[in-house]
Image (cartoon, grey):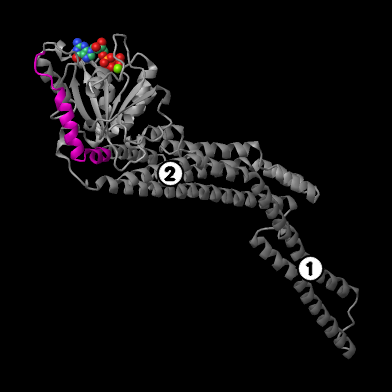
Amino acid sequence: MSDAFQDLCARARGWFEGALAAGWLDEADLARLAAVEQHTPGELFAEQKARPLVVALFGGTGAGKSSLLNRLAGQEIARVGVERPTSREVTLYVHESVKLADLPAHLPVEAVRVNRHRSDVYRSVLWIDAPDIDSTEEANRRSALAWLPHVDLVCYVVSPERYRDDVGWRVLRQRGHKHGWLFILNRWDEGDSQQCEDFAQVLRAAGFDHPILLPTCCVPGRELPSPDQFGRIQALLTGLVEAHAVEELTRLGHRARLLELRAALESAQRKLGHEETWARIAEAARRQWRTTFETIRAGADWPLRTTAARGVSTQEAQLDQLLGGVWDDWAQSKLGAYLDAVELAVRRAGVNAGPVRRKLDEVAAAAGDGVAQQLRDSVRAGLSRPGTPLVRAARRGTGFLMAFLPLVALLWVGWAVVAGYLRAAQGTAPFRGADMAIHSLLVVLIAWAVPFAVDRLLRPSVEQTILRALRAGLAQALGDCGAGLERALGDSAVAAAARRAEGDRIIADLVAVLGRSPEKEVPELGRLIPQLSQGDARAGAADKAHVGES
Ligand SMILES: Nc1nc2c(ncn2[C@@H]2O[C@H](COP(=O)(O)OP(=O)(O)OP(=O)(O)O)[C@@H](O)[C@H]2O)c(=O)[nH]1
Ligand SMILES: [Mg+2]
C-alpha cells in the first residue's frame, strides 16, 4: 500500500495543481489538499521496509512523559522538572543500529535530541518524548503537532488530576483513526481506584471499545490505589512488534490519509460541475442571449439609420469608418451584462467561473471587430445587388418590358406603315400623313414609358439599400457572436469534464487501494484503534485543517 499511497498522493497533487493553474480551483482548495496528511512514520528512517515501531509519549505538561521515558531507558535521558513546561525539545530514544533519515523539512530540527541505546529490549521501537501538546508555549505545541504524522502508536499520558478536562486529548482525538492508542494514567500515587474506570468510560465514549489503560507511578516508594502497570508497556510493545504491528499500523495510517485525500478530491470535483450542472448553465446562457440579442438589435437600429443616411453621401473609406462606430460602448456594455449573468449562473451552480469567464471574454473582445467586418461585407453585397429578391424579380420584368413593348409597338407601326403604303400604291387608300407619324411615335413612346415608370418606382434608394444591408449584417454578426459564446461555454464544459474524469480515475484507484484486504491481521490492534465511521474520518480531515490553522 505504501507505494500506492505515495503514487496516489503525487497524482492527487498533480491534479490539484493542474486544476488550480487552469483556474478551476483556488488556494482554499489547495489548502484542503495541504491539510491532508502526507507525512508518514516511515519518512524518519533510511530503510523503511524493516523499520522500528514509532511510539510517542504525548500529553499535557507535567503528566510525566519525560519521567516515563527515563524509567523506560533506565537512565536520565530526558529532562524532568518542576518548571512548567519542562521539555521544549523532542527526545528520540532509538537503538544504535537504526539508520535515521534526514528529518523532513517541516520538523524543527534544532529542537530534537537523539539518544542512542544498545538495549535489545527496545531494538524494534523508536521512542519519542514530545513537548506538551496543550502548551501555552506556541513553539512546543507546534513541535508536538509536527511530529504526530510520524507516529505509529500514541502513548497518551494523563494525570488523575487532569484527565477529564485534558485539552491535548481534545486535539488528539480528532486524529484517532490515524494511529494506535495506548493510555497511561501516570502519577497514579495521586489518584484513586475509581478514576481508572472513569477514564475508561471517557475513552469508550470516544470510540475505544476496550482501551488499553495502564496506571503508572514514576516516583518510587509511593503508596498506590492499585499496582503499577509499567511492566505491561514493554510486554505489550514486544507483542505488537512480533505480530507485525508496524505494517498494520502503517496500513491504518495510509488508509486514514487516503480517506482524507478522497474527501479533498471529491470536494474539489464539485467545483468543476457535473454534466447536468453544465446543461443547466448552457440553458440559462441561451435564454440570457436571446434577450441580449433582441436588446442590442433594437437598440442599434437608430445608429444603423443614421449610418445609412450618412452613408449615401460618403466615400467608401468614410463609410467603412462609419460602420466601425456602429458597435459602440452601449452595445459592448450589453454584451458585458450578458457575460456577468452567465458568470453568476456558473457561480450559483457552485462551479468556479474563472476559466469560463476567460473564454467568454475572448469572444466578447472580438465582437466589435466582427460586427464591423460583417457590416462592411453586408453593405458591399447589398449595394451590388440592391433590393429584395421580389423587387429584383419585378425589376427584371420591367427591364424586359422596357425593351419588349417598344419593339412590339415598332413592329406594329412598321406593319401599319407598309400596309398603308401598299394600299396607297394600289390607289385604294390615300398615303398616310403626319398624323400617322405622330401617333406611331406616341404608341412607341408609351410602350417604353409605362414599364420605365414602374421600374423607377421599384428601384430602391441607396439609403434603404444600405439600411437593409446593415440590419441583415448586424443580425448575422450577432448570430455569429452568440454561436461563438455558446461554443466557448461548451469548450469550458468539455475541459471541466476532462478534468473531472481524471479526478474520477484517481478516486477510483484510491477506492481500489482502500478496498484491498490487509495482508496480515493483528488481533491485538483492535484495542488500540478507535471504532470510527468513514464520516468521522472525513470530519477528522476538516478538523485537522482547523487545528493546523489554530
Ligand atoms: N507524584 C508524582 N510525580 C511525578 C510522577 N511522574 C513524574 N512526576 C513529577 O512530575 C513532574 C513533571 O514530570 P515530567 O516528566 O517533566 O513531566 P512532562 O510530562 O515531561 O512535562 P513537560 O515536559 O512539561 O511536558 C516532575 O517533577 C516529576 O518528578 C508520578 O508518577 N508521581
Ligand atoms: Mg517532558
129 vs 112, left or right, is left
Q: Nearer the viewer, mark 2 or mark 1?
A: 2
Does residue 258 show up? Answer: yes
Q: Quadrant of ligand 2?
A: top left
**Residue that mark 1 sits on:** 448
Nearer to us in this view, 178 or 323: 178
Label 2: few (<14), some (14–19) or many (≥20) C-alpha neighbours in 10 Å: some
Three-letter residue code for mark 2: Trp
Question: Secondary structure under badge 2?
Answer: helix
Residue depicted at 86% across the width and 75% down the height: 436
Q: Position of residue 109 (x, y in %)?
A: 41, 26
Three-letter residue code for mark 1: Trp
The magenta-colored residue range is 224-251
Question: Secondary structure under badge 1?
Answer: helix
**Is residue 357 positioned above or below 85 on the image?**
below
**Is residue 328 positioned above or below 228 on the image?**
below
Q: Residue furthest bottom?
A: 426
167 vs 414, left or right, is left
**Residue that mark 2 sits on:** 15
Picture quadrant where residue 420 is located: bottom right
346 vs 407, left or right, is left
Picture quadrant where residue 54 is located: top left
